[in-house]
Image: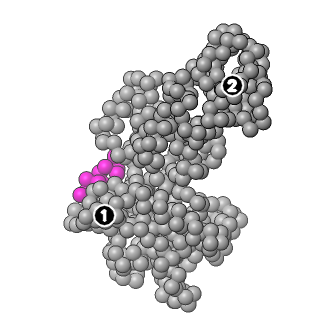
Amino acid sequence: MTDILDDLAWRGLIAQSTDLDALRASMAKEPITVYSGFDPTAPSLHIGHFVPLLTLRRLQLAGHRPIGLVGGATGLIGDPSGRNTERSLNSTEIVAEWVDRLRGQVGKFLDFDAQPNPALLVSNLDWTGELSAIDFLRDVGKHFPVNRMLARESVSARLAGEGLSYTEFSYQILQSYDYLELFRRYNCTLQIGGSDQWGNITAGADLIRRVEGGHVHVLTQPLITKADGTKFGKTAGGALWLDPEMTSPYAFYQYFLNSDDRDVIHYLKVFTFRSREEIEELEKAVAERPFAREAQRTLAEDLTELLHGRPELDAVVAASKALFGQGELAELPAATLRAALAEVPKAEVPALGAAYVDLLADSGVVESKSAARRAVKEGGAYLNNRKITDESYVPTADDLLAGRFMVLRRGKKSIGGVVVG
């Protein structure tokens, strides 16, 4: 069971640990219980949450017991880590709704029927909600030296800037109390989280030592970055969300399909369950046949199937091929077609009537109407994968896909769309 730590290290999933050798010894002795927390600060988790979530799954597959904690209580407060300004507080009703949504997302990746290590899914409101302010201050707060709290990077950075309210200042106490409660209730002895959570998590380990005399472990994971310096998980439309209504399966697939050669092997290690041998073969393919993009395709397919299921993966792969003339566009579901066109330049028109060359220019597929006419003359202009040879052609209702869409293409790679109505 200790091989899991070697695997995590090889995948680049260990940033800091209180004592890796001691953790290895604990795992060798018997299966341990591990948790990671997810706060409902939005109606969905995003791709960054995938790192600890999939690590919980890896640890469960290795025989350990995972706990997914959704922050019904901490979500009402807000973590100051990584923020320059005070977080806006959401209502209890909104947080409760988001807790339910996150429960479904976290639960999707854990096995609650596995024996002898079934997963658990909990909310910290279950124990924090019972605490009075007096009990919280007397029984928990007294164990937190203020000078040490002030020294934590997430606090000191804010104090040097716009300041920090007592509400957010207390966040690390609440998170620490979670670890204490999970230690008491389930003998949880390992907490994992992002490297920006180091101060909060080690505070929890220290609280357990002070209150219960227990020795527990902390393991943090690197925050994912991109080789080109742009922020990982950010798209033109915002964050890459796990909810298909917020980031479509098609957009999710395309994001990873377009991974930089410099990033793709790291992403395969972090986000997939491919073996070392498989990933090393893909690494060789990147070096020898970068044009084939085998690693990117594997990454995109594995992740899309993992998150959205095989039917959605088949639909987005079919859409990707059809958009570039390798499949039948008319067979695509309307939702998949809409999601695909959301990722390309497009024109929105109230009704049919415009000439094809005008639509080609207005959509942004070509830079001007003269360029559109030239594309038609040269034989490189397509409507729904059908070559257009008449410069004066005006699309009709028969050209509409799912009643309101058209796909425009110049050559093999320049794709655009039209949405009617």
Report which quarter residue 94 is drawn in: bottom right
Q: Nearer the viewer, residue 282 or 336?
A: 336
Q: Position of residue 68 (x, y in %)?
A: 42, 65
Above or below, 391 against 118 in this view is above
Residue at 33% x, 78% y: name it. Answer: 214
| Residue 304 visible from this viewpoint | yes
Report which quarter residue 181 is drawn in: bottom left
Pointer 2 residue? 365
- From the viewer's perspective, tell me whether residue 66 is left or right of residue 98: left
How many labels sit on residues? 2
Mark closest to the chain's N terminus, 2 or 1: 1
| Residue 260 visible from this viewpoint | no
- From the viewer's perspective, tell me whether residue 207 is left or right of residue 95: left
Residue at 57% x, 19% y: name it. Answer: 412
Pointer 1 residue? 113
* Dot 1: element: loop
Which image quarter holds the N terminus?
A: bottom left
* Span colored in magenta: 1-10
Residue at 36% x, 56% y: name it. Answer: 57
Q: Is residue 127 magenta?
A: no
